[in-house]
Amino acid sequence: MRGSKVGQADLKRLKKDLQAEQERAALAQRVAALKKPAAAASPDADPADDLAAFRRTMQSVKPIKHAPRVEHKPAPEPAPALRRANALGETPHRADAGVSDGGEITHLLSEGGTAFVRSDAAPDTARNLRRGQWRAGAELDLHGLRVEQARHALLSFLDECQEHGIRCVRVVHGKGYGSEGLEPVLKDKARTWLVQKNEVLAFSEAPEREGGAGALLVLLRQSEGPRK
């Protein structure tokens, strides 16, 4: 009986050792399979499989962004009056030709020096202009310009508006708060220039909601067609 018990214990221990040996062998096989290079392809591998693998790899590739390129844009076209003069071989018309910065015009103004009406226009034209009888079809802002720049900009603007049939315009000259000594330089200059332009029938200080003392409403004559 005693020998039988010892033999059974040995068998159990032997069986346990055998199972452990089998488990170690299986583990070694798995480790060897993991260490095997994945790129070791068979000589008989199908090229189609390689192409498919390449495409799958390229799906995660992002294109390189190109550096910004400098674009050379064409020069802006000249104003219509200048294009027309160039086409005819003529000297371009200068809007400010014959218009000076000086001259006392106080005697020509009305409404306390805030308006002007040319002699061949109805006396109440400036008053009606301020009341909104004509709606401004274009606007020019002279802020930040020197006197010479402002003169050329204003008179060129008036010429362009008349060519396009715009009769009423709004000119913003400012109230002079940013000028040296807080003197409204362009305010007086703009009035001087406008009086010298025969195309200007009248002008009036704008209503407060449209700029007040810092802007003018200007009424132009009806255009007689393009300048030749």
Image (cartoon, helix red, strand yellow):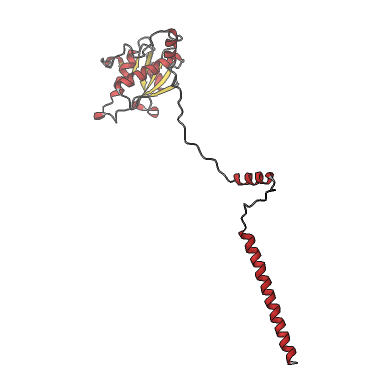
Depth check: give the residue in front, 94 or 26.
Answer: 26
Q: Position of residue 163 (x, y in %)?
A: 44, 14
Depth check: give the residue in front, 81 or 103.
Answer: 81
Depth check: give the residue in front, 171 or 217.
Answer: 171
Depth check: give the residue in front, 228 or 25.
Answer: 25
Q: Is residue 110 visible?
A: no
Residue 203 occupies which quadrant of the picture? top left
- The total number of labels drawn is 0
Residue visible at 75% across and 89% down in the picture: 4
Q: Position of residue 152 (x, y in %)?
A: 34, 18
Residue 83 occupies which quadrant of the picture? top left
Above or below, 122 relative to 150: above
Q: Can you name the residue that lies furthest to the front here?
A: 43
Above or below, 30 relative to 1: above
Q: Position of residue 128 (x, y in %)?
A: 41, 19
Q: Is residue 28 visible?
A: yes
Left or right, residue 85 beside residue 185: right
- Locate the C terminus and report the quarter of the image it occupies: top left
Residue visible at 34% across and 16% down in the picture: 194
Residue 17 occupies which quadrant of the picture? bottom right
Q: Can you name the residue that lies furthest to the left here?
A: 181
Residue visible at 66% across and 68% down in the picture: 25
Left or right, residue 211 beside residue 26: left
Q: Position of residue 122 (x, y in %)?
A: 39, 12
- Locate the N terminus and report the quarter of the image it occupies: bottom right
